[in-house]
Every structure is written in C-alpha cells, then in structure tokens.
Amino acid sequence: MMDASLLLRLFLGTLLPSALLPLLIAVGLRYGMGEQLWAHAGLHALVEALVGFMGLFVAVVIKLLHRNQQVNGRLLWLCAGLVLSIPLMALHTAPGSDENVVIWLYALATLLGGGVSAGMLLGEQWHSQPRLPYAALLIALGLMGWAMFFPEHIPDMGQWSQLSDLAVGMNLIGALGFVLAWFALISGHVVSGRRAPLLLGNFSLLMASAAIIFLLADTWDSRWWFYHFLRLAALALLLSYFFALYLKDFRVLRENDARFQALVESIHAGVYRTQVTLERRLVYASAQMHQVAGLSMQQCQEGGVSLKSLVVPEDWPHVQEALEWSIKTHVPYEMQYRINHPQRGEMWVSDRGRIIKDHQGQPCWFDGALLNIHEARETEQQLLLAKQVVQTASEAIVITNHKNQIMDVNPAYERITGFMRHEVLGRNPKITQSGRHDASFYATMWKHLVGEGHWSGEIWDRRRNGEIFPKWLAISAIRNRQGVISHFVGVFNDISRQKSTEQQLERLVFYDPLTQLPNRVLFRDRLIHEVGVAERSNKLMSLLLVDLDRFKIINDTLGHGVGDELLLQVSKRLIASVRKSDTVARLGGDEFAIILPGMERAEDAAHVAETIINQLQVPFSIEENELFVGASIGIAVHGQDGDDYDSLTMNADAAMFKAKESGKGTYKFFTPDMNIQNAKRLVMEAELRRAVDNQELMLHYQPKVDAESRQIVGMEALVRWVHPTRGVIPPGEFIPLAEETGLIVPLGELVLTRACAQVKQWWDMGLPQVQVAVNLSPRQFQEPNLIEKVSEILRKTGFPATGLELEITESIAMHDVDNTIETVKKLKDLGVRISIDDFGTGYSSLSYLKKFPLHALKIDQSFVRDLGGDDDGASIISSIISMAKAMALGVVAEGVETAQQMEFLRGQECQQVQGFFLSKPLPPSDFLALLERQQETGCAVTDVMGGKAIT
Ligand SMILES: Nc1nc2c(ncn2[C@@H]2O[C@@H]3COP(=O)(O)O[C@H]4[C@@H](O)[C@H](n5cnc6c(=O)[nH]c(N)nc65)O[C@@H]4COP(=O)(O)O[C@H]3[C@H]2O)c(=O)[nH]1
C-alpha cells in the first residue's frame, strides 16, 4: 500500500517544485525577455542541449548499470525510450528547420519516448533485452536522417498555432505512453524502495504533462517554455535518481573497500591477488604479507613481486601444479609449501585461494590467503615425532588426566598388561593393581608425586590374564601454564625377566646349585649375622660341621649321579633334623655346616648332632642301591670356642676332624687341645716332606703264603717312616696326610723303585723268584704319566714287569671305569699284574669287574676278622672265593691272625693267605732270611702250622 504521507511529501517535494519551477521560469521568460528572438533561441538551444545531454547520459548509465546487473531489465525500455526521443528532440534546434519538421520531431520524440517507455509494462520475456537501446539508437538515427534529408516526405503536422490531428494524436499517444510508464514505475517492479518508484514516476508524469502542454503552446510563449522546462525538470529528476544511485553505489563501494581492507588487515593471513600468468605476479598484497612472506611495505602496496620468487625452488613445481589444477577445474586450491622469508629463512605457509574469472568467464586472478604455519608445522612435526616415539617405545606409557582417568596408552602398554587401549580409556590405572601393596604404599607414592612432581619405584601389577608381574614405574605430573596439574604420564617396564635373572644370579652366588642350600658365601654371611645376634642376646649359638663318612667311596664307585642324589637326600634329612630358624649350608663336597642360634645350653647342640647322626645312619635307597653313610660332626660354641667367623669355623673343623679320627659316626665338641693336634699335623706334613727327601722311609715286606703248600709265593711291600725322634711311624698315620697333600706321588715312586730294586737284588741272589705287590694310591693312579713312570722304574731297576703286582683299591677301580680299564690294560700290557685290595668294602659292580684284566682279589681283613664271630664274614668270604673262581681270579685273604681262620680259608680253597699268623711285615734283612730258609728247607713257614708264627 502506498504510504499517503510519503505520496504527499513526494508530491510537494518533487512533483510540485519540478512543475512549478518550470512554470515560473516560463512565465518569467515570456514577460522578462519579451520579443527578443535571439535571446529565446539561445536559451532554447541551451535547454534542449541540457535535455539531450541528461537524457543520453541517463540512457548510458541505465545501460551500464544493467550490464553490471545493478538495475532491473525493465529499465532498458526507459533507456530505449530516451535513446529514441532525445536525439529527435535535440534535432529540432538545428538551424533552418521549418515548422513542420520541428513539430514532427517533437511529436515523434514524444510518441516514441512515451510509447517505448511504456514497454516497462510488458511481460517477463520482454525484459532484459540488452540490444534494445542499440536498436532504439538505430531507429532514432534513421528517423533523424528522414527528417533531415526528406523533409518533404514528413506528414503534415500543421502549425504551432494550429497543429494537425496527427501531431495532436502522436503527442497524446506519447503522453499516454508516459502515463503507462508511470504505472510501471510506481508499481515497484522496475525499481524498488519507497521513494525511487515515485521519484521515477514523477519523471514520467512530467514527461506526459510536457506532451499535453506542447499541444497548447505557441512559439516562445510561456506554455512553450513551460513544456521545455517541464522536460528539463523531468530529466533532472531522472538524472538525480541515477546520480544518487551512483553515489550510493560509490559510497557502498568505498565502505566495502574500507571494510575489506580492515578485515584483510585484521587477519593473520597475508591476502594476495596474483596474475594467472606463469610468474604469478602479485597485483595486490595485504600488509600482512610483510609479516608472512617478508615483502616490504612498498612491495605490498605496489605489487609486482612474483609468487615464484617467494617460494622455495623445490616446492615451486608443486605450487604450480596446484594452481594449474585450480585453473583447469575452477576448484579452490589449498596447499602447504615453504617460502624464502628474507629475515626468517625458510618458513612453512599454508595457501588457500581460488581462481577469479572476468565477466567473460576467463580466469584472470588468483585470490588467496597465505598463512604462516611454520610454528604450527614444527609443533606438528614434533608432536608427530613424539607420537611415534610413544608408539614405538618399548616401555609402556600411560597418560591420565588430572582425575587420573586414562587418556591414552601405547602399544607397549597393551603388550605388557594385555589390556587393549579401548578397554582402558577413561578408566583408572588401578585396574592393573595387583593388591600386593597396601593403601599406605599408594598414599606415600601420591604424596611424593604431587609434592615433587615425579615418583619412581618398583611396583607389582596384574596383567589382564591375572598374572602378577613386577614393573619399574616412573610417573611425572604435568602442569599447565597456571601451574595446576593437568596430566600424569606413567612409564613402566616389565622387569620380571630381570628380576628372575637377579634371583637366579643371587641363587648362583648364594646357594648351592645341587641341594639349593646356602653355600659358603651365604653361610659366612649368616654366621657373622648370628654371631652379632648371639652377642646381643643371652642365648648360645653353635656351629656344627658335618662330614659324611663314606661319601667319597660311594661317589667314586657308583658315580656322580648316585653321589649327587645321596647329597640331596642327606640335605633333606639335615633340614628335617633342625628348626626352621637354623641354617643348613653345604660348604662343598660332602661337607655341611649347621648354625644353631638361640640355644639355652651347649648340650642342645649335642642333641641335634645325635639326631643328625641317627638320621644319616638310616640307609639311603638310591637307584636300587642301599647305601650306608655315617656322619662325623664337629661342634664349636660361640663365646667359649670362638667369637668370630674364622675362629668358629676353624675350631668346628678341628672338632670334626677329631670326630672322624676317633671312629666315624660320632660328634665332638671342640676342645683347645684339638688345635694342638692340628698344629701337630702341620708339623708332620713338613717332616714327611723332608722324610721323602731324606730317605727316612723304608720298606717292610709281608709274605703271601700258599695256603696249601705253605710256601711264600709273594710279598707285599709296606712303607715305614723311621722318624729320627719318634721312631717307626706306621703308614696309617702318614699315608692319608701324604694323599691329602699330594706327597703320595713322590712317596709312591720311591716305594715302587725301592721294592723293584730290592726284589731284583734277591732274585739276582738266586733266591725264590716270588712276586712283590706294591700299593697304588688313588692319587697315584690318576697321574697322567703313570704308565711311563712304572715302565721307567722297571727299566731303571731292571726288574721284570712279571715280578710286579700293583694293588689298587675297589674305589679306584670303580671311579671313572672306562679310563681305569684303559690304564689297567696298559699296565697289563707292560706285563704287570693287578689285584684289587680290601675287596668287599666298596661297591664293586660285578659286570664292571669282569671288564678289568685282573689277576687277583684280596679279601679285606675285616671279613677275616669276623670269622667265628656273629657277623656273616664267613659267608662273604666264601662268596668272594667262589666268585673269584668263576672269574678265574686268584684270591688272597688278608689279616689272617689265627689257626682257625687259616683252617677256614684252607677249607674254602683260598689260594693265598697273608697275616700276622704267618708273618708280620718284615724289614728286608729278615725277609731275606725267610727267603733263604725257604730255599734251604723248601718251606719257610712249616712251623707255623704248629701254632707258632715265623717272626
Ligand atoms: N691287624 C692285622 N694287620 C695285619 C695283619 N696282616 C697284615 N696286616 C696289616 O694290614 C695292612 C695290609 O696292607 P693294606 O691293606 O694294603 O693297607 C695298607 C696300605 O693301604 C697302606 N700302605 C702301606 N704302605 C703303603 C705304600 O707303600 N703305598 C701306599 N699307597 N699305601 C701303603 O697303609 C695300610 C696299612 O699298612 P700297614 O700298617 O703296614 O698294615 C698292613 C699290614 O701290616 C694281621 O694279621 N692283622
């Protein structure tokens, strides 16, 4: 609805003045200038020129605005109306035009101007005809040409005072056209807004009015001037509208530009426009390009710098490619590349832009924005790197927020805990708690973590499968800029393998690998510890050293497998014999130590020792063998027998040695005189060393007699130590010491050489050529050059190998059976005979025995001694004899002391006998006499059978 007040204001403000003013001017001119024709003609030309200029100007403006799509297409009809009418109107001022032509031009201009302007009312399909103004121009030119060159063909238009009907009709139709155009204009379809339709409508009304007044006017009268000025006012209205429109556009443009500038300068990005040529020269660069790309402010303002010169050469092809692609596809581009910043060096930028086309759709610019992303990219790279580090780290990493909710974990976390990332996100890390640590542990941990910012330590956790494992955990608190804890980062390692290695190492260092008992190192530690405890308390502490009595024989004869099993079983019995607080340790070989702390009386240690001895006397059953071992125990009590590790162990050792000495299977408390005995042993060792060198050793010979013929068939060489002060020392007292110290090797060589030399001498004397038997100790037997030594001695002494018999013990035979068989075979190859001494005391396996190239078995004297007693010596002897017979071996019975024993052995068809009943071991001179007697009488021991020994 048209606003009435607006209508009134427009009427009063626009239409009225624009009609009144021409009227006043016209009246003023008529009466002011009178009949001065020259003045009227000049003013008329000026007015028409102004009308013509304004009309054409407005026509051009409408056309241009339409091309820029700033005005409605209907206005092209108004434009065409102006193009048609204005030149025609202007033409009538040409000098020499006759009245008919002038009226014709006027009427035609009014007709065509109004008629074509009314085209604004036409339907949609008639709008936006860009060629319409040109067509109008052509028609106008044609009509002008007609009027100018063929005035005679112009219809009769009458005179100013009396217009023809045609002239009147054309003017009326033209006026009607302007009225119709007024309808079109005020409808709001041509121009929008409140004032514009009325303003333009006024133009149309004035034009219509001018056409009507034209009909009433006469040349130079006031009506005549009136319609001229009406048209001038109408066009002035039109011009003012479009001028205002232009001004408005210009202002908007300027505002937009200022706004655009402000906007562009306010953003961090450098905004640019470049040419689409290959160089991509900048035609516009915002001031930010100074910051982003290092352009000078002058370069920013003037442009001209090529984008190519800014970009790092390696990246340019990539930039070119993206821009070309954008030209081709018209799709905006977005890329990241490096530019050479003159001050800051290579900088990463992000470039987003698009192709701009001209009005013909041809690409003409690239408009883009360059953003410095160097720091962001560096940060991104660092983040990427950090992420990769986290992802590939072998340590588990868990990140929580300040509420201790898991925000992220790495693959190592998943591998170690078994929990997948998605299972733990948002949960508390305590899902892996093992329950091994109490609340106070975690409270301390958190206190330290929050206070110090970090915590590290060993902690036990639980895997998803329930398995508990140790880990080394380091947690750091991460604080934000305000210093408030925002995150926690936990890094941990599964240290179960390391732990078990540590434990294994600890076991290796501190425990005996066979029995798993503490070894000497840990024993020492514990003993020192218990000494300290005993000193602080009123309790006694005792140390027991336990040595197994027959372990060596068992180990040598039945092998290490049996030996190891025996030690295992012994260790179990020892543990079972003491309290849990006591320490049972294995010091090596068959030696064990027991620490008994917290005892009331020393006798308590004796009870424990008795228990142990009783326990170890119970036979052990290993691999179908029933094995008997006893134990000798030495006891030292803290305080009375020593107050430190060294004195206690030394004294317990001395006590143990004494226990062994005083018959096995017993215990002894340490007494001070034991140390004296120890000292004695040391002295003896030195003396024995000297004795070997000083020829203090001499040999005695004990005859072996044929049980049937009673003739001496052999002899055993037995060493004696003739001590300068102590007299003759029997071998039982020094052979073990020699064996222990290694002195047995030179001693054994000495004995063998002496025996061979002695018997060779007797043989050379023509005496009965009986064999001599020499004892070989285990240590001698294991000498790698034994064979060479024996053959060298035989060679040196010239004694035939067949005259020599070497006695080895059962334990030697059964130790390392294969090697022993080898050595025995080699000895046999030399011609030497081998017999097994003390047979029956060891654990000889018959099947092995068969493999040895033996000569004879010597029945141990303990069985002979048992004859006639309760023990089953007789049956053992007869078994040995029948076994030897079966194996085609000779048998010698040792230790024959009585006629009964002799009788028994003869009855059992024992081939040879040896013993005090026949003869004690004799010095060489006595044995020589015996041999000589046998040579003379044929039998050296005849009288013996009468019950009297030879010596
Ligand atoms: N009670 C009793 N004893 C009798 C009787 N008949 C012989 N004997 C003793 O029995 C031991 C026999 O020697 P053995 O079994 O080889 O036992 C020997 C032997 O193992 C070792 N031995 C002696 N001389 C040597 C030697 O030159 N080298 C090595 N390696 N060991 C030797 O010392 C051990 C002890 O030698 P001896 O004291 O000489 O003791 C000798 C001998 O005097 C008897 O009727 N009644």
Image (cartoon, rainbow, N blue to C red):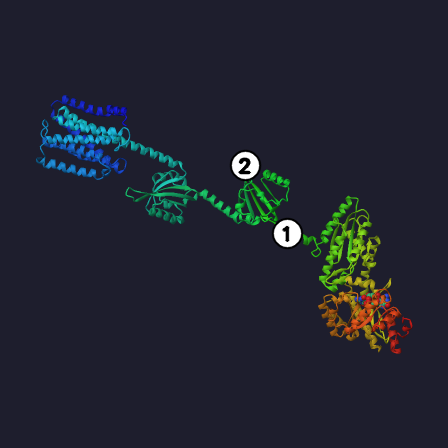
Question: Which residue is more in the foreground, 393 or 288?
Answer: 393
**Quadrant of image for the C terminus:** bottom right
Mark 2 is on which residue type? Answer: Val
Residue 179, above or below 729: above
Question: Which residue is more in the foreground, 768 or 503?
Answer: 503
* Residue 717, horizontal then vertical, whole percent: 82, 70
Res 759 quadrant in image: bottom right
Q: Which residue is mark 2?
A: 484
View extreme (top): residue: 31
Q: Which residue is mark 1?
A: 500
Residue under the image location 90 percent in, 73 percent down: 945
* Residue 427, horizontal then vertical, whole percent: 55, 42
Q: Is mark 2 within 8 Å of ligand 1?
A: no
The reply to whether residue 796 is visible in this rendering is no
* Residue 620, horizontal then vertical, whole percent: 76, 59
The reply to whether residue 499 is visible in this rendering is yes
Mark 1 is on which residue type? Answer: Ser
Question: Which of the two discs, 2 and 1, labels the residue nearer the N terminus?
Answer: 2
Residue under the image location 52 percent in, 46 percent down: 422
**Quadrant of image for the N terminus:** top left
Assign a secondary structure to mark 2. loop
Assign a secondary structure to mark 1. helix
Residue 687, above or below 29: below
Question: Which residue is more in the foreground, 824 or 430?
Answer: 430
Residue 360 in the figure: left or right of residue 831: left
Question: Which residue is more in the foreground, 933 or 570?
Answer: 570
Residue 418 in the figure: left or right of residue 65: right
Q: How many marks?
A: 2
Counting other residues with Cα less than 10 Å from the Cα at mark 2, is it few (<14), some (14-19), or many (20 or more)?
A: few
Res 71 quadrant in image: top left
